[in-house]
Amino acid sequence: MADPKDIVAPAAGPSLATLGIDAARPLVIVDVDEVLALFMEGFGRFLEARGLEFRVDRFALFQNIYRPGETTHLEIEEGRRHYDEFFRTACGDLPPSPGGAEALRALKAAEAEIVILTNAPGPARMGRARWLGRHGLDYPLLINSGPKGPAVAALAAQTRSPIAFVDDLLPNLESVAETTPHAHRFQMVADPRLQPLAPSTPERHRRIDDWAELGQAIAEAIRR
């Protein structure tokens, strides 16, 4: 399990040294939901146990939650309450993305450093750390809120080594492009149901939805 000292809010100024990261090595910064974890699958099971339906018919979250038989999605605020409850009580019940742990282990073996950067509510911190540890993803964990560009820039400012960033959401990729333009950016959408629905700009952020291929592409990008 990730050590609690590794759970550092980026707003406090993440330190590579505090995280045990060697600034002389390439740095790979990776998201969790729909990158290392199949969030929609786990959240959908959580909702179904509460008598709701989770229909993956758009690249959205709350707009996919329905009461059985209804054609209008659940009210956004009610969906958000279920989301918060999931992170309080059940965020450890997520299937891992196939090949993610193996790809990161190979990158680590090739002397890359790994940092997990996830947007999650505060109460989910320990649950998320335990989930990562159970699935062979015991790397330093940063809990973020909002766009990820500032957190990535704060890490990048501490090293001159190559950097790669992996996320499923275009706003986070664009945020990193603005703050850290030299970072290699990869979009990864793990859930096959979401892959055809996810907006992409491959001319700006390389899109690879398979971890075996993505791991090789990252290794090539950060090779010095």
Image (cartoon, rainbow, N blue to C red):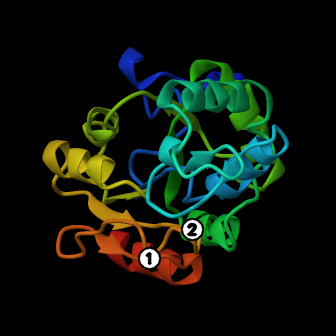
Q: Amino acid at mark 2?
A: Ala
Relative placement, left or right, of 15 versus 158 is right
Question: Residue at the location (49% across, 61% down)?
Answer: 112
Q: Tell me the quarter of the image containing the N terminus.
A: top right
Q: Which mark is residue 116?
A: none
Q: Could one spot residue 84 in this view of the protein?
A: yes
Question: Residue at the location (45% across, 61% down)?
Answer: 58
Q: CA distance from mark 2 to mark 1?
A: 11 Å
Question: Residue at the location (18% across, 68% down)?
Answer: 204
Q: Position of residue 45 (x, y in %)?
A: 78, 50
Relative placement, left or right, of 194 versus 27 is right
Q: Which residue is mark 1?
A: 196
Q: Position of residue 135 (x, y in %)?
A: 79, 55
**Residue 121 location, quadrant:** top right
Q: Which residue is mark 2?
A: 190
Q: Position of residue 147 (x, y in %)?
A: 31, 36
Q: Which-is-in-front pick, marks 2 and 1? A: 1
Q: Could one spot residue 3 in this view of the protein?
A: no
Labels 2 & 1 near each other (Cβ < 8 A): no
Question: Residue at the location (39% across, 66% down)?
Answer: 198
